[in-house]
Image (spheres, rainbow, N blue to C red):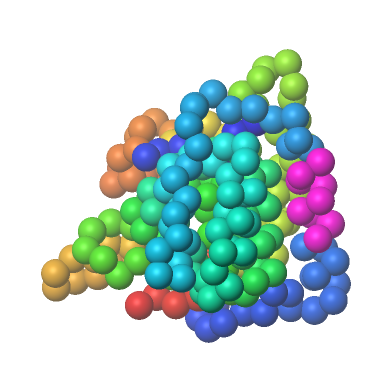
Amino acid sequence: MTSGGFNGKGGLTPPCLHKMQCRCFAKMSIILLLFLLDSWIVSAGAAQITLRSSSIFVNGRLVRGDFDYFENLMKQDHNVSHVVFEDCFGGYVDEGVKIGELIRLKRLSTIAKGQVQSSCAYAFLAGISRKFDSSFGVHLILLHATSNENAEKDIAAQANVALIPYLKILSSERLTSEILSLVRQSTLPFQGVVFVRENWIVVNTEKVAYCDGLERGNFKNCIVLPHVDALHLGVVTESK
């Protein structure tokens, strides 16, 4: 099973809002991991995970062993404070969940630069503070449900039962039932809810849109969802 697709109010949030959510966070994570242990991926090549100036950069697709590599980098520099997901296109869901759990445990901040999709987006959401990169251009976060790469193992539906509440908890309960419903039904490549920030010379704009999968990466053709934004939905904790 893989996760992938096209290439409130702000402020810091605690790891869990209260004890019940802490237990729920752990329970959902454990269930998700149990369902995904037998998952597999078609695309080859591990993500590029690098340590630069006490920040960890994650680029590419998450494959087996990426969490271990990420954890080892954390041990090399105890001053790591940020994780930058830069053109991170999904991959193994359980690797993304485990990276996210470590990010939340260490109370790290996360930054979305370029395209951050699927399992990479799940890990991004675990940041204690979260924001879009401030560099010139388009930055986006794509959320959608998991899907089966192996038709003989239909475990995606079961995994998504855990995944959707898990995403809600990571957003501090701000992702609405309408948005989560769109995420839940999105299992095709290029399909899902996308949160976009465009940084241009004079004007910066943000929007939330639903992509039905037919756009094949052209988010400009997705349907804009009115009256919602990444900040108030808890996807980011600051908009600047």
* Quarter occupied by the C terminus: bottom left
> On the rendered structure, is 107 left or right of 30?
left
Q: Which residues are magenta?
A: 26-34
Residues 9 and 115: in front is 115
Foreground: 147 or 108?
A: 108
Residue 52 sits in quarter: bottom left
Q: Can see residue 185?
A: no
| Residue 76 at x, y percent in the picture | 56, 64
Extreme bottom residue here?
Answer: 11
Q: Is residue 157 left or right of residue 53?
A: right
Residue at x-position 53% and y-position 83% = 11
Q: For residue 78: magenta? A: no
The quarter of the picture where residue 39 lies is top right
* Residue 218 x/y as whole percent: 30, 40
Q: Position of residue 216 (x, y in %)?
A: 36, 33
Q: Residue lying furthest left in this view?
A: 201
Q: Is residue 136 placed above or below 37 in the rendered structure?
A: below
Residue found 40% across the figure and 38% down from its top: 6
| Residue 7 located left or right of residue 158 | left
Residue farthest along the front direction in this orientation? 76
Q: Position of residue 193 (x, y in %)?
A: 49, 50
**Which quarter of the rendering shows the N terminus?**
top right
Q: Nearer the viewer, residue 174 or 94?
A: 94
SS majority, magenta: helix
Q: How many numbered discs?
A: 0
Q: Is residue 228 above or below residue 195?
A: below
Tell which of 24 and 53 is nearer to you. 53
